[in-house]
Amino acid sequence: MLSFYNTLTRKKEAFKPLNDKEAGLYTCGPTVYNYAHLGNLRTYLFEDILKRVLINNGYAVKHVMNITDVGHLTSDADEGEDKIETSALKEKKTVWEIAEFYTKSFKQSLADLNISEPDIWCKATDHIQEQIAWIKKLEEKGFTYKISDGLYFDTSKFGGYEKLRGQKTSDMKEGARVEKNTEKKNPSDFALWKFSPQDSKRQMEWNSPWGKGFPGWHLECSVMAQKYLGETFDLHCGGIDHIPTHHTNEIAQAEAVTEKPFVNYWLHGEFLVIGKDVRMGKSEGNFITLNTVKEKNVNPLAYRYLVLGTHYRKKLNFTWEALQAAQNALDNLYALVANLGEPKIGCAEFEQKFSEAINDDLNTPKSLAIVWDLLKSDYPNEAKKASLLAFDKIIGLNLRQAKPIAVPKEIKELADKREQARQAKDFTTADKLRDEINKAGFKVEDTLAGPVIKK
């Protein structure tokens, strides 16, 4: 049974799509004003596992991801400067150049991490008229009001506004994620359309029935998701920081118009933390990009391996030592897989265990443990290889590309003798044999599945 933890209901539920063997999936994409950092990419990795698991279970997945290239201000609550405009001013480029550059960078990071691209990319700036049309519908239904800086959604008129975040509007603290705005009727009210400033000209602005300006950040996802996936669809994902404001507002403006459930399953990934339990983020000024990882000669897939080792709903503490350990483990995994020969009929016992683990709310740590258990097992090498390649369709570590290295017969014999000495607890002899192997230009690493010979 395929099941996920649904943020909306706060419990694990069996997955039942709207249409048999089809799954509509919307994942919140990047705001393209800077590089995606490892914390951002952790979310896209969990969403990639989700998509692969759905496909592995026989579902035809329609995956939509937005590109936020306008309207995301420095505060989630529609205050401050537009992030794209601010970045353009800082880098002395146009907003369009900034958006294009960081979109390309983001897509390269996806490729480096073996994350499959969505079926549909949708940019906020390509859907301005659809967003204006949506605001008109909300206006007709009486959900909007106008203040000096824009047109706002009145959250007090939408019943069940708190259902996703589980926090009453009256309990929200202005000045934290929600900035103070004395003109707003309620602290949680959010902008649908922001007016251009009177004293300066924005690079991105459009005419509307309410005045020249640009759409609020929250609007784009509701509008584009429903355009491509329908008024109600199966799955919507993002980081947990989207729960209290962005996704809550998406639900409100979508359901206010359609009067139908917006999304049936909401999945959210936990933070990547660094140091003393501080989330990695651009606003925190502690972010690390994938380019930095590559500059340190670490395989980007080592970061994918590191992420697999912690459940997506638990915090993951990033350290360079942990990443290096993941790199070593991945190298050992490649070496072991490369020497298994040609794949034949797989190991049904382990394939069943793997399927049960990964289908249980994407339990990647347990699934990764099963990979190593299979390697340690007594099954024939060709059966192990077949199952491992099947697992890799989900874990995405490119195991098929693992190539065996040429190891001379005498080195293999020395490694065998060393392993026999180790098993007999004759560590003096084992160390001497290891030194001989090292002098010949090779090394032996002891893994969960036995010794691995490397150059």
Image (tube, rainbow, N blue to C red):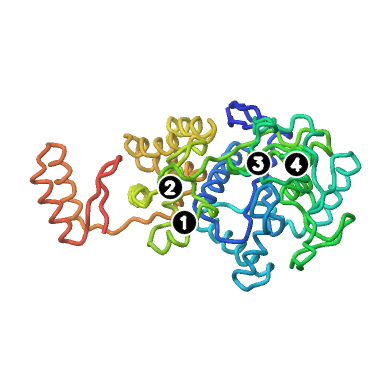
Q: Which residue is mark 4?
A: 189
**Residue pictured at 58% horizontal, 31% vertical:** 5
Which of discs 4 and 1 lies nearer the camera? The answer is 4
Residue 445 x/y as whole percent? 25, 49
Q: Which residue is mark 1?
A: 288
Question: In terms of secondary structure, where does tag 3 sit?
Answer: loop
- Which of pointers 1 and 3 lies earlier in the amino acid sequence? 3
Mark 4 is on which residue type? Asp
C-alpha distance separating marks 2 and 1: 10 Å
Up the image or down, 2 lies above or below 178; here it is: above
Question: In terms of secondary structure, where does tag 1 sit?
Answer: loop
Q: Which residue is mark 3?
A: 174
Q: Could you classify mark 3 by the number of other residues whose Cα lies within 10 Å: few (under 14), some (14-19), or many (20 or more)?
A: few
Mark 1 is on which residue type? Ile
Q: Which residue is mark 2?
A: 274
Q: Could you classify mark 1 by the number of other residues whose Cα lies within 10 Å: few (under 14), some (14-19), or many (20 or more)?
A: some
- Which of pointers 4 and 1 lies earlier in the amino acid sequence? 4
C-alpha distance separating marks 1 and 3: 30 Å
